[in-house]
Amino acid sequence: MRIVIAGGHGQIALRLERLLAARGDEVAGIIRRAEQGDDLRAAGAEPVLCDLESASEEEVSAHLRGADAAIFAAGAGPDSGAARKETVDRGAAVLFADAAARAGVRRHVVVSSMGADPEHPGDEVFDAYQRAKGEADAYVRAHRGLDWTILRPGMLTNDAGKGLVRLEAATGRGPVPRDDVAAVLAELVDTPATAGLTLELISGSTPVSVAVKSVAGN
């Protein structure tokens, strides 16, 4: 498969790129800064320079053309303000979805957030983040040109992944290593039977491949 990842220099994306490249997939990661390219190359991915906050749908679509799947793993980051939650966590996600559909890339996986909700109350930056992610998820779910899966991990940690998770429509809150999030994404993108599902993910007792097969109905 050829897979294009938005937010290619993110902590989850770099882990995912290593996994996909190791299994023989062709991976491209969209990045904002050229100096991030070496990290992607080291992970086995092709760096693609494109700022999703300023690019046109046509520009992004050109980078997606010929891909078998697209993964949105971009984020404004914990140190950004409410304005960038709107331009990245919502705006870039919407742009990427439209560009994927325009390029004919139907398989579309989104890294969202547990608790994402367009109606999330509150005035803090985190509240704005949850609303932005919720609005982006709603847009993708309504998109007829995509076979989408939305993944909502719990509290992300840098603990070593154990490959044991709980993956369900509703899991309740809990932590999950970024290693395991990447492993689940690698399985989801290769499991089209999970299209149309919004899934929550935390650490658990089920091996990743078994958890994905279970939600896919296999």
Image (tube, rainbow, N blue to C red):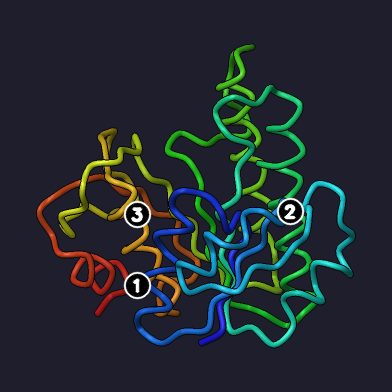
Which residue is at 28% across, 45% downward? Answer: 177
Real-space CA distance between mark 1 and mark 3, rounded to the nearest whole angstrom: 10 Å
Q: Which mark is residue 187?
A: 1
Name the residue furthest top: 123
Q: Earlier in the sequence, mark 1 or mark 3?
A: 3
Q: Position of residue 64 (x, y in %)?
A: 72, 76
Q: Which mark is residue 69?
A: none
Name the amino acid, label 3: Val
Question: Is disc 1 surrounded by few (<14), some (14 to 19) or many (20+) residues within 10 Å?
Answer: some
Q: Can you say whether 7 is above or below 97 in the image?
A: above
Q: Position of 135 compared to 157: left or right?
A: right
Contact between marks 2 and 3 (CB within 8 A): the answer is no
Local secondary structure at mark 2: helix
Up-down relation of residue 66 to residue 13 (above or below):
below
Q: Secondary structure at mark 1?
A: helix
Going by the image, does 134 lie left or right of 215? right
Question: How far is disc 2 from disc 3 in space, using C-alphas?
Answer: 22 Å
Within 10 angstroms of label 3, few (less than 14), some, or many (20 or more) residues? many
Number of residues whose C-alpha sits closer than 10 Å to that of mark 2, classed few (under 14), some (14–19) or many (20 or more): many
Rounded to the nearest whole Å, what is the CA distance between mark 1 and mark 2? 23 Å
Total numbered circles: 3
Residue shown at 60%/13% (left/top)? 124
Tell which of 17 and 43 is nearer to you. 43
Label drawn at residue 181: 3
Specify the amino acid type for callout 1: Glu
Res. 100 image quadrant: bottom right
In the rendered image, which quarter is residue 168 located in? bottom left
Mark 2 highlights which residue? 94
